[in-house]
Amino acid sequence: MKIDLPTLQRFFASAPFMVDLGVQATGLGDDGRVHTRIDLQPRHRQHSGVVHAGVMASMADHSMGAAAQVRAPEGLLVLTAEFKVNLLRGARGDWLECEAWVVKPGRQISFTEAEVHAVAQDGRRTLVVKAAGTMALTRAPSNDSASSS
């Protein structure tokens, strides 16, 4: 199955936590790079005014998983096996943009990376997160599994 931007947007829309956070897929490169965005709200921020690390980590994780899914063979689903987030500085801005890509695709695992930038209304972009993830490729459950129980 060829994954295009509308399919990627449905993937994000079908994940309740991503919907709660407000993460939206905004682009899909020919090389499988996934672009996402969160318009920041007061609920995304710490008491100090910077964006909560959990918001940025979740955005990076799901975006990396989506990038791995774009490159995965037909019939396989992607699950995060491990990920690391480097918080480079406190995120201040009006929205976050994430770009995620597959560094090394594989038959059982894929290695991914992502960057998150805080963006201000004036267009100023600040790199706030570098992330890396190992994504496990698993068989999609068959539709017959429900009828066999």
Image (cartoon, rainbow, N blue to C red):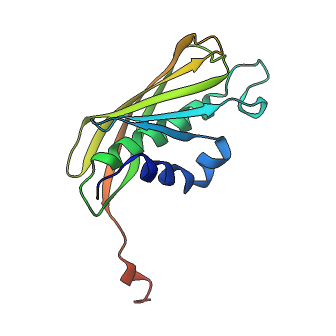
Q: In this view, which residue lies farthest toward the bottom? A: 148
Quadrant of the image for the C terminus?
bottom left
Q: Measured from the top left, where is residue 43 in percent x and y?
A: 76, 34
Q: In the rendered image of this protein, does residue 19 appear above or below residue 74?
A: above
Q: What's the residue at 55%, 57% (across, down)? A: 14
Q: Residue at x 55, y 38 (%)?
A: 58
Residue in view at x 56 percent, y 41 percent: 24
Viewer-closest of 146 and 123: 123
Closer-to-camera residue (79/120): 120
At 40% across and 32% down in the image, what residue appears? Answer: 100
Above or below residue 111? Residue 15 is: below
Task: Give residue 68's quadrant in the image.
Answer: top left
User: x, y percentage for residue 136?
Assistant: 32, 50
Residue 81 spot, x, y in % from top left: 38, 46
User: Is 58 left or right of 120, judged from the image as shown?
Assistant: left
Name which quarter of the figure residue 67 lies in: top left
Q: Nearer the viewer, residue 107 or 16?
A: 16
In the drawing, does residue 133 fall left or right of residue 120? left
Image quadrant containing the N terminus: bottom left
